[in-house]
Image (cartoon, rainbow, N blue to C red):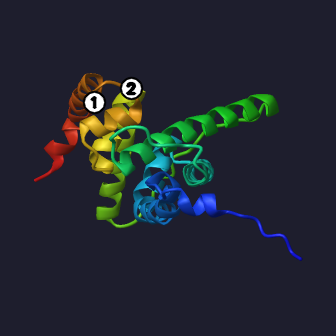
Amino acid sequence: MKRRCDHSWERDRPVTVRHLRPLLERPTLEHELERLHPESWGWALSCVGGNTDLATEALQTAYARVISGVATRSGGSSTRTWLFGVIRLTALEELRRVRRTVARDDDDATVALIDPAPGPDIVTERAERAAALRAAMAKLSERQREVIQLVFYHGLTIEEAATVMQISTGSASTHYKRGKAALADALAHLREDVP
């Protein structure tokens, strides 16, 4: 005679949202990651200075942390704000790992920004403008550059950018204003060239 386990106590337990959360959140979370992937890729690229290999590694690691539950949401920020924070911290870890590896290997580790190939006048003019913008962005402090990228290129509010950067809203606002002013000064000559 087979012995049957009595699991009647499980039937009597109420099913709570806590029990269903892993079943409900995973597809929704994966859908959100897919929806936010183009923006996440751009943010990962900007966090690692344009290096596609480092951006790929950082983004894959960030996604793995999010899906596995290692990175968890704690507050009321949007999914995008929270995800960008995870990507930023993961990218910084990736950069530190590469720097340690490079220091051990004693290799030359410079990230080169590739200018577009020369072409017609319009392409050349756009390339010069893009180079001027990259140069102006490179002169900004790291915090100014991050808040400008989050607000202009990723459509976050200053408050959301502050959350991603783990600084106060006031600090983010100050870095944003100073960064915009510095960019306006650095790029003023480009406005004079426009008819």
Q: Residue at x 75, y 28 (%)?
A: 103
Residue 152: x and y in percent read 27, 46
Q: Nearer the viewer, residue 83 or 108?
A: 83
Amino acid type for the residue under numbered disc 1: Gly
Q: Residue at x 40, y 66 (%)?
A: 119
Residue 194: x and y in percent read 14, 51
Q: Residue at x 62, y 49 (%)?
A: 61
Write down the residue under mark 1. Answer: 179
Q: Residues within 10 Å of mark 1 (few under 14, many from 20)?
A: many
Residue 83 showing in the rendered view: yes
Whether residues under marks 2 and 1 lie with C-beta atoms below 8 angstroms apart, the answer is yes
Q: Is residue 38 above or below residue 73?
A: below
Residue 19: x and y in percent read 52, 55
Quadrant for residue 123, please give it. bottom left
Q: Nearer the viewer, residue 17 or 37?
A: 17
Q: Judge from the rendering whether residue 11 lies leftward or rightward of residue 151; answer left or right.
A: right
Cα distance in 3D space between marks 2 and 1: 8 Å
Helix, strand or loop at mark 2: loop
Write down the residue under mark 2. Answer: 141
The N terminus sits in image quarter: bottom right
Q: Judge from the rendering whether residue 152 lies leftward or rightward of residue 43; answer left or right.
A: left
